[in-house]
Image: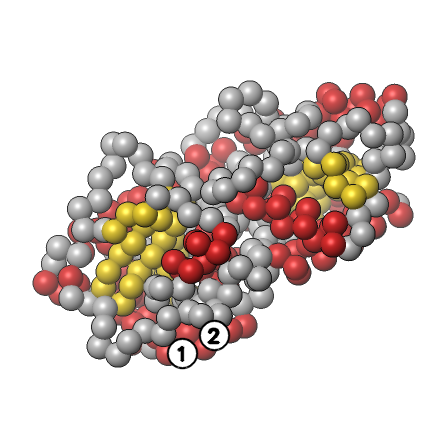
Amino acid sequence: MKISFGSKIIEGPWGGGNLFLINLKEYLEANGHTVVFDLKDKDIDIILFTDPRKGRGSTSTFNKKDIKKYISKINKKTRVVQRINECDERKNTKGVNQLYLSSTEIADSVVFVSDWLQSIYLQLGLDENKSSVIMSGSNELIFNTYGRTEKPVNKKFKLLTHHWSSNYLKGFELYSLIDQLLETNKWRNKIEFTYIGNIDKKFTFKNTKVITPLSGFELANEIKEHDIYVTGSLNEPSGNHHIEAALCGLPVLYINSGGIPEYVENHGVEVTLENFEERLEYLIEYYGQFEKKMKSYPYNSTTMCEKYERLFNKVLNQ
């Protein structure tokens, strides 16, 4: 098969959509397929359409209009698979849902990264018969428990989160709470908190260790130095941050919002701003049991990529 990705790949720390393309490209090429990033070739089998947006900040290499022109004038046998991992709810934007919904008219199959995200578009009128859900996964050759530091007895529990985006909805209300808890006598000797990633210039941590964005093995090694992962991200369709941490063996404290619970509800503890201390104490008390559960965490990139390969073949055979 020859598959054309509708987005270029960025080297280094960037975001979950970029990691998806990296992992899928490596898998497809390792299994004998060809990956290109434009519509110049006449023998493209599958167009993977990932982002209809253009302009500043976009990594798109072609849009809906380009795809329609290619199919009508160059290769009518080419099939289009659209992957949607975005919505207005994620960053409180306007027009994103309608833009993505409009772009599905050219797609033979539409894939979502969570049931939560799929439900948004089904309510907007998307044809359920051509939509499906394939859960995201991170590269298990990088994110795994090999070499992970075991928590020393009677040492502080090391909490961690990481984000490429500095958007406040990524969880900064919860991270601010943790930062404040570190000023109290109750918690300053029990926990540490590390934030890896970008931070809005208007936001300041007082008691939190901040590390600039990391990726690949460097990020994985840092994750493995910690004990508990925290994500306060709101309306996140999928996200990669909690998947990477879970594959590294860290139980996850998470807020019941967006698609994240679908990924970690059996491998962590749900929290709210009001009960965070109580739920953190619960996880610390039963930490050994939760740590054992992490060995069965299922969302890796190989499983994800196998499902995309099967979908591509199914769409072609139709």
Structural crowding at the residue carrying mark 2, measured as other residues with C-alpha within 10 Å and reported as few (<14), some (14–19) or many (≥20): some
Residue occupying the far left of the picture: 185
**Which one is nearer the viewer's eye here, 89 or 47?**
47
Whether residue 128 is visible: no
Whether residue 135 is visible: yes
Residue 243's place in the image compared with 97, above or below, is: below
| Image-based side of 185 in relation to 135, left or right | left
Q: Which structural element holds mark 2?
A: helix
x, y percent for residue 48:
72, 38
Q: Residue 289: give its label.
A: 1
For the N terminus, which image quadrant? top right
Query: Residue 151 appears in which quarter of the rendering?
Result: bottom left
**Which one is nearer the viewer's eye here, 21 or 239?**
21
x, y percent for residue 25:
68, 46
| Residue drawn where x is 58% and y is 30% of the image | 59
Q: What's the residue type where badge 1 is placed? A: Gln
**Which one is nearer the viewer's eye here, 44 or 243?**
44
| Image-based side of 144 in relation to 189, left or right | right
**Which one is nearer the viewer's eye here, 152 or 49?**
152
Query: Residue 191 appears in which quarter of the rendering?
Result: bottom left
CB atoms of marks 1 and 2 within 8 Å: yes
Residue at which label 2 appears:
293
Q: What's the residue type where badge 2 is placed? A: Lys
Q: Residue 268: give its label.
A: none
Q: Which structural element holds mark 1?
A: helix
| Residue drawn where x is 69% and y is 26% of the image | 62
Structural crowding at the residue carrying mark 1, measured as other residues with C-alpha within 10 Å and reported as few (<14), some (14–19) or many (≥20): few
